[in-house]
Amino acid sequence: VQLQASGGGLVQAGDSLRLSCTASGLTFRTTTVAWFRQAPGKEREFVGGIFRAGSTIAYADSVKGRFAISRDNAKNTVNLQMNSLKAEDTAVYYCAAGSRLILSSMRRDQAYDYWGQGTLVTVSS
């Protein structure tokens, strides 16, 4: 199983970025995919996730209304559209996937079996 995250970069506050996570080696349509991030000196935190085929999408309160997750099962890809970026969104963003987790565990990083390599998002103020 491989997860490939892409789309990070350096932007200014208020700008937008779209991250993509492409998976291979798993049955994508039945897999829950989430984005986590880790800022320097901080613990990794849940950003948003889409449960299995997309029946449920959840976001961290800090990004709700600004970020949006979507998935394209035909391309085995989950996208994270990030709008109105703030300096505090600066972090390494990781995508994670899991086929066995239940809905109530979607926000827990320990629930995921597979992780991408991370992509750096830097927002300058």
Image (cartoon, rainbow, N blue to C red):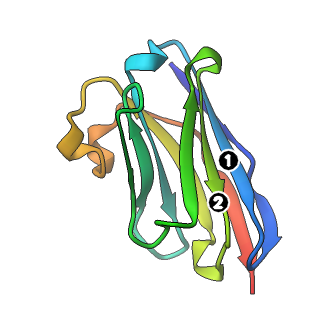
The residue sitting at 49% across, 67% down in the picture is 63
Q: Is residue 23 left or right of residue 7?
A: left
Q: Residues within 10 Å of mark 2 (few under 14, many from 20)?
A: many
- Mark 1 or 2: the one toward you: 2
- Find disc 2 in the rendering and name its residue: 82
The residue sitting at 39% across, 70% down in the picture is 61
Which of these two is toward me, 109 or 64?
Answer: 64
Q: Residues within 10 Å of mark 1 (few under 14, many from 20)?
A: many
The residue furthest bottom is: 125
The residue sitting at 71% across, 50% down in the picture is 18
Give the residue type at disc 2: Met
**Image coords of residue 24 (percent x, y):** 57, 17
In terms of secondary structure, where does tag 1 sit?
strand
Q: Is residue 113 left or right of residue 124?
A: left
**Image coords of residue 19 (percent x, y):** 67, 47
The image's mark for residue 19 is: 1
Q: Is residue 106 left or right of residue 102?
A: right
Give the residue type at disc 1: Leu
Which of these two is toward me, 51 or 98?
Answer: 51
